[in-house]
Amino acid sequence: MSLKRKAAAAATDASKKPKQNGSITAFFGAPKPNPNAPAKQSAAAAKFDKDAWVAKLTDEQKELLQLELDTLHESWLPHVKDVLLTPQFLELKRFLKKELNSGKTVYPPMQDVYSWSRHTPLNTVKVVITGQDPYHGPNQAHGLCFSIRPPNPAPPSLQNIYKALKKEYPDYQPPPNRGGLLTPWADRGVLLINTCLTVRRGEANSHSGKGWELLMQKVIDTVAKVRTNGVVFLAWGSPAQQRTKGIPVDKHLVLKSVHPSPLSAARGFFDAGHFRKCNAWLEQRYGKDGGIDWDLNVDAEKAKVDAPKTSVDTEKTNIDTEKTSVEAEKTSDDAEKTGVDAGKTEL
């Protein structure tokens, strides 16, 4: 039985007891939209003509935005296209081009930079979790915050997320072999995004402040605007909380706590109860099956990393395949040694 179903069974038993302080609906606010309404393509996406838009781009813009045109999911492009043409974002793409052309190794591999958009199309988003910086070791980052490629073990922050889940759901079992691949969550509607989407190998925050933040704020704002049935934003750490400041709380739920980093988790993360609160609210909005199943023990084939349908120039991905699992633990240790608290680096 999945965690979500076990929670539902527990809720049924609890419903037989006297209620205190009103119902869960009174606590979270009564939902206005139809909780059973199917996810629909946004009006902007329905009207968007990608070919016509691309035809208006300059040759340089087409070259700089080839990655976005090839790998960003079609549900997101109509909403972020204007940001892609801003001077800040185009300068970011020039910077990345220079990094790659100079022989720098950049993570994640280019085809994975927008994997979050393919695993979680806009019309499927129910939960948003925001990280900061991709893992900067080889064969680790793949475009989803906190998630790490196998066979690497779950880094410290993700281990703390598992501990919080275990505290809320006593039957919860982390994935086998200390794994940390979170694609099942992403495929179920959990948008796992970093505010900076690339990093130079071995140099945390090396691409921060270059322009990714502008795009990712637009992504967050788009979710808040388009997903009118309601979304839960899990804001862990002050940077994530800053990103959710403008979220209308009459339509969405913003749950705040310290970051799950070992540097801060003991100050309230384990007792926040975010996963159960998240599902209770989603079930009010989307019906009894509307919560997220947090179980990661799924068939390996179903949990694999998504690949874009359109090929990307692999010569410019600079994927280092020589040292995979050897440096995974080292990177986790290095991240702790930076001393950056509450989300300034993704541990």
Image (tube, rainbow, N blue to C red):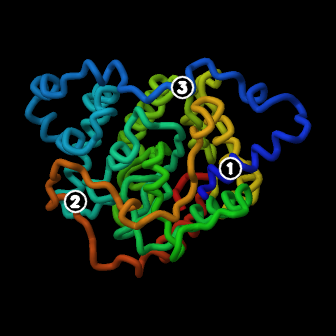
| First in residue order: circle 1 vs circle 2 | 1
Cα distance in 3D space between marks 3 and 1? 27 Å
x, y (%) of residue 106? 30, 60
x, y (%) of residue 265? 69, 58
Which residue appears at 57% of the width and 42% of the height? 240
Give the residue number, with chain letter if any, for mark 3: 229
- Judge by depth and name the residue closer to the eye, 269 or 85: 269
Give the quarter of the image for residue 210.
Answer: top left
Rendered position, 3 above or below 330: above
Does the residue at mark 3 contact the one at mark 1 (Cβ under 8 Å)? no
Which residue appears at 68% of the width and 39% of the height? 280
- Judge by depth and name the residue closer to the eye, 333 or 68: 68
SS state under label 3? loop
Give the residue number, with chain letter if any, for mark 2: 317
Give the residue number, with chain letter if any, for mark 1: 258
| Badge 1 amino acid | Val
x, y (%) of residue 39? 43, 29
| First in residue order: circle 2 vs circle 3 | 3
Dot 3 surroundings within 10 Å: few (below 14), some, or many (20 or more)? many
